[in-house]
Image (cartoon, coloured by chain):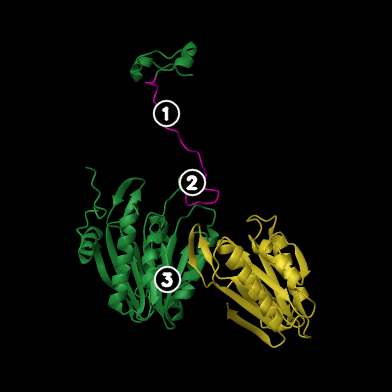
């Protein structure tokens, strides 16, 4: 036991053994606890291993339609209640024909998607033809299955174009790989799905699809605290991908959409009067 | 949360599965085909969370094909069922633990005999005429027992499956709207969505 001089900690009352029951409210600040936790054990999204308690604070979405694939993402990064950035790039440009979206741990997504990019390029050089979207996503799935209990946190979508068309896959850190037409990933995904499911049609034009993507992300950022910043939109077509919007501020969108409905956007739609 | 259920008739086997993949409260996909086609006369419906269903399914499919190419021998249903069981059994005390998925393996042999096998993640194997995996057991076993009779025709079998689907949609808390049904007969495999 180390003997501290109580006055150096600002204690008005000396803590002695016999005083244990009447401890002063100005108690000793506890020493920072070092968490000796290993990286073993399954990752859980909420709770679970404290070192790996990443929250997927984001909204990303992608859908397949007649003109290809549309990806729309927000740009907020948060560490608990602190917003670390409002300008994150959550669509990762793997190569000229493949895009990946980021949700979960930024480092994990960036690293493994870069690793995938390396693998795609090596394959292209060795075999003379581009890796298909199915094969690229399967390669990533294989890696993530291998690291299954190591605490990786990734909920990404791989979207791209190859000789068979445009394809969208969802891949997560559990090793799940799903092919689909509509996906939304992240804490705001449930809000985005509401808008997406309501307005989605395969026969949409590009403009309608871009508008839908923007709206869905806006609605998710409005209701989800962990999503926000700007909306970035990418379009994948048979010649590769195009960045449609590099960053539309969701705050501007809020007032714009409110105006379209004849509202002001000050949140006072209920016109509550207290007196 | 997957529902996999199946029925063996006089000359056919049906295995049906729900199409949903869920993550906590979200249904990510509604049209996922959980019944694997091992070859033209064998199907394997797998129920399990996350990657296990997919990865074990692929493991079974590729190893099944490998045996065919290596030995030239075409495994019949009984041999396949025992082979899959041994894959489950080998994994139970391995480093990564058991494969976290259960299955229903069904098919028709070259002489036209149908069979359905119930397999579980610890390596249990049982030949059955009707059964289910997961929560579907609770809702469907009574109905399947009630409706089953020996030597069912294909049309009767499909009717029973429709009744099972209706029952799940009526009583199961989790909404399962789309079901994928595969029927194996001596002529091959038919797939449809209900």
User: Do badges 1 and 3 share one subunit?
Assistant: yes
Mark 3, chain letter? A
Residue A99 spot, x, y in % from top left: 37, 70
Residue A113 spot, x, y in % from top left: 41, 64
Residue A235, label in figure: none
Residue A245 higher or lower than B39, as above or below: above
Q: Which residue is mark 2?
A: A47
Eye-nearest disc, 2 or 1: 2
Mark 1, chain letter? A
* Chain drawn yellow in the picture: B
Q: Which residue is mark 1?
A: A31
Q: Residues within 10 Å of mark 3 (few under 14, many from 20)?
A: many
Mark 2, chain letter? A
Eye-nearest disc, 1 or 3: 3
* Chain drawn green in the picture: A
Residue A71 higher or lower than A105, as above or below: below
Q: Residue at x 46, y 45 (%)?
A: A51
Q: Which residue is mark 3?
A: A182
- Residue B65, by quadrant, is bottom right
- Residue A204, by quadrant, is bottom left
Would you say the magenta stretch is mainly helix, strand or loop? loop
Q: Residue at x 30, y 49 (%)?
A: A84
Examine the rendering and report whether any part of residue B84 can be seen: no
Q: Residue at x 44, y 58 (%)?
A: A154
Q: Quadrant of the C terminus of chain B?
A: bottom right
Viewer-side residue, A56 vs B176: B176
User: Do badges 2 and 1 share one subunit?
Assistant: yes
Residues rendered magenta in the picture: A25-49
């Amino acid at each position: 036991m180390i003997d501290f001089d109580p006055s150096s900690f600002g204690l008005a009352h000396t803590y002695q053994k016999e005083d244990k029951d009447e401890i002063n409210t100005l108690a000793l600040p506890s020493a920072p606890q070092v968490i000796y936790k290993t990286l073993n054990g399954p990752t859980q999204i909420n709770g679970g291993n404290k070192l790996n308690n990443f929250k997927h604070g984001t909204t990303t979405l992608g859908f397949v339609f007649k003109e290809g694939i549309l990806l729309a993402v927000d740009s907020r990064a948060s560490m608990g209640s602190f917003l670390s950035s409002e300008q994150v790039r959550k669509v990762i440009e793997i190569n000229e024909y493949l895009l990946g979206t980021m949700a979960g741990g930024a480092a994990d997504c960036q690293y493994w998607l870069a690793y995938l990019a390396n693998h795609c390029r090596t394959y292209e050089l060795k075999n003379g033809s581009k890796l298909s979207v199915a094969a690229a996503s399967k390669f990533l799935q294989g890696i993530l299955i291998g690291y299954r209990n190591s605490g990786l946190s990734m909920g990404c979508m791989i979207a791209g174009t190859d000789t068979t068309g445009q394809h969208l896959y969802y891949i997560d850190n559990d090793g799940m790989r799903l092919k689909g037409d509509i996906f939304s990933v992240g804490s705001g995904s449930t809000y985005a799905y509401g808008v997406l499911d309501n307005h989605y049609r395969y026969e949409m034009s590009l403009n309608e699809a871009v508008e839908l993507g923007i709206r869905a992300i806006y609605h998710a950022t409005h209701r989800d605290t962990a999503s926000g910043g700007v909306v970035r939109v990418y379009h994948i077509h048979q010649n590769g991908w195009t960045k449609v919007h590099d960053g539309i501020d969701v705050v501007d969108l809020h007032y714009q959409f409110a105006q379209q409905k004849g509202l002001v956007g000050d949140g006072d739609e209920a016109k509550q009067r207290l007196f | 949360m997957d529902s996999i259920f199946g029925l063996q008739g006089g000359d056919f086997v049906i295995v049906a599965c729900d199409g949903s993949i869920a993550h906590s409260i979200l249904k990510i996909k509604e049209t996922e085909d959980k019944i694997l086609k091992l070859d033209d006369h064998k199907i394997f419906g797998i129920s399990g969370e996350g990657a296990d269903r997919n990865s074990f399914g692929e493991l079974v499919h590729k190893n099944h094909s490998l045996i065919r190419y290596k030995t030239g021998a075409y495994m019949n249903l009984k041999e396949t069922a025992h082979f899959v069981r041994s894959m489950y059994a080998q994994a139970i005390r391995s480093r990564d633990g058991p494969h976290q998925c259960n299955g229903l393996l069904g098919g028709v042999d070259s002489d036209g005999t149908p069979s359905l096998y119930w397999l579980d993640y610890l390596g249990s194997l049982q030949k059955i005429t009707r059964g289910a995996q997961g929560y579907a057991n609770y809702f469907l076993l009574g109905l399947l027992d009630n409706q089953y009779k020996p030597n069912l025709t294909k049309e009767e079998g499909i009717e029973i499956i429709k009744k099972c689907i209706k029952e799940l949609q009526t009583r199961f808390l989790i909404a399962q709207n789309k079901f994928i049904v595969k029927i194996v007969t001596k002529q091959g495999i038919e797939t449809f969505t209900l």
